[in-house]
Amino acid sequence: MTYPMKTNKIVIQILRIFLAALLLVFSLNGFIGFLPMPVPPEPAAEFLRAMSEAGFVFPVLYGIELVLGVFLLLNYYTPFVLIAFVPIALSILLYHLFLDPLGGVAGYLTVGIGIILLWAYFDYYKPLLKVK
């Protein structure tokens, strides 16, 4: 694999694998529930309760995270996976910024790694940004 950005390949690989691990752990935890989750502040709890009552949001979210995590771990379609992760990362960031700012260390870390990886693979996205 060649990396478009002139950077340390090993660092990018480690970040990719770490992001994959985060996605896999949190998605599997959503399905299985092996990690205890801290009690969120009341506005965040109400938001999570409403999303849970919808019935489909969390299974779809965890399923997408699981697939993205596996693809990142195997280094398949990595530039596409990173773009597909953007809406999830944005949701994670906004949730923690507005509803649970103190409980978002893993979320902030996940978003930060996603941004670094997007930057590392930026040359793949340049054709998408050309004005025709």
Image (cartoon, rainbow, N blue to C red):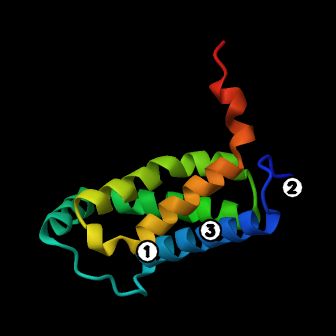
For the N terminus, which image quadrant?
bottom right
Kindly report which numbered mark, 2 or 3, lies closer to the viewer in this rendering: 2
Mark 2 lies on a secondary structure that is loop
Mark 3 lies on a secondary structure that is helix
Mark 3 → mark 1, Cα distance in angstroms? 17 Å
**Numbered label attached to residue 20:** 3
Q: Position of residue 58 (x, y in %)?
A: 37, 62
Q: Position of residue 39 (x, y in %)?
A: 22, 80
Q: Is residue 58 left or right of residue 82?
A: left
Residue at the image position 56 percent from the left and 65 percent from the top: 66
**Numbered label attached to residue 31:** 1
Mark 1 lies on a secondary structure that is helix
Comparing 53 with 37, the one in front is: 37
Q: Is residue 23 left or right of residue 58?
A: right
User: Considering only vertical position in the picture, is 121 above or below 106?
Assistant: above
Q: Which residue is mark 2?
A: 1
Label whose residue precedes the other's in the sequence (2 or 1): 2
Q: Position of residue 121 (x, y in %)?
A: 71, 48
The image quarter containing residue 124 is: top right
Label whose residue precedes the other's in the sequence (3 or 1): 3
Q: Is residue 20 left or right of residue 99?
A: right
